[in-house]
Image: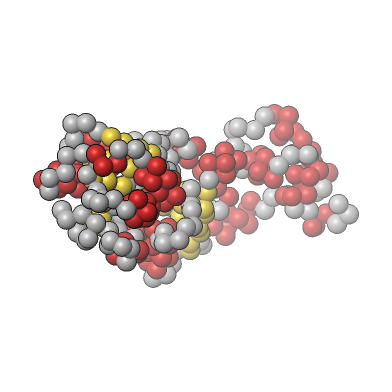
Amino acid sequence: MTNKQTATIKDVAKEAGVSVSAVSKVFNKYGDIGAETQEKVLAAAKRLDYIPNQAARKLSSKHKKIIALILSGLKVEKGVTMPFEILTGVSHYLDETDYEFVFYGTTTKKQKEKSLKQFCAEHSISGLLIQGLKTTDPYYKELANFTLPTVAIDLQVGNGAISTISIDNEQAAAEVTERLIKAGHTHILFLNGTKQDEVSQKREAGYRSKVKNAQVVYAHFSEEEAFDYIYQMEKIEEVDAIFAASDLMAIGVLKALRERNLAKPPAVVGFDDMALAAYVTPSLTTVRQDIETMSQQAVKDLLNQIEHQKVTHRLLPYEIIVRESADI
């Protein structure tokens, strides 16, 4: 560096031979950085006359109120609208407040590189909305002892300081399964997402609570995996109903059943009531949850927690939408 006024955090990282994340952790005084790395970073900063502008950042943050929305495992696929409904609901509500809005799409890999605490400190976050975590994710584990005002959407984290909001996924799945049984279906296959996803766990628990001989397959919320499994499934004629834990998987099921051209295809039920559910053939019976309303209520609950220290655990209503794929 020849011009010390232009030194940046990237310059310090390069000079010290470490990552930008490591430099940030040193200056934010995180405890997971070794003494040797700290010495390298501080020595490099001294050589470059780099001074982190902490005072200016703190002064600025006094005048800013920033809400972060973190969506984990964000997948953009045809017809999948849930992430965008969450984003729309949050941003529309915050537009009417004096809070600023930060959106962060994360993955397990990113979570290992930067802790939740570090992300919030770097962006001066006042409160957090989070959705989509698996129980094995680093952020999920970190939430167990998290103290920043937070609302977990469709997620229970075992931390009484964190607000939660969802529908009763277990009850909804139990009700669908009970309706299928009352409609005469005796062999119900449950097509689930993953074992690590809490929503999957709740929906599977609801299904299992109503059947004697559970049959569960995991298709990772993938239309293609659901299609492949049903298309190749042996003795499918023994199954008289298929309950999928998401509409996307249910649509894969419907496509596979059409390809197989069965004389008497099983009833099919999905979950979420995504935009395509009413337009596929046959139209999909499903569980509707109002994601935009849920998102806006999550923001209200978060602001209430920030401004009045009130933690809320809220269950919103759901509705079973009966269409052509299953008369329940």
Is residue 257 toward the left or the right of residue 59 in the image? left
Is residue 254 toward the left or the right of residue 19 in the image? left
Splitting the image into 4 quarters, where does residue 144 fall? top left
**Residue 31, can we see it?**
yes
Residue at image location 74% in from the left, 50% down from the top: 10
**Of residues 92 and 226, which is closer to you in this image?**
226
Residue 47, image x and y in percent?
83, 44
Residue at image location 60% in from the left, 55% down from the top: 57
Residue 307, image x and y in percent?
36, 55
Residue 296, image x and y in percent?
34, 61
* Residue farthest to the bottom, as pictured: 96
Splitting the image into 4 quarters, where does residue 239 fall? top left
**Residue 190, can we see it?**
no
Is residue 226 toward the left or the right of residue 209 in the image? right
Residue at image location 33% in from the left, 42% down from the top: 191
Residue 103, image x and y in percent?
50, 58
Residue at image location 29% in from the left, 41% down from the top: 236
* Residue farthest to the right, as pictured: 2
Residue 138, above or below 226: above
**Of residues 216 and 186, which is closer to you in this image?**
186
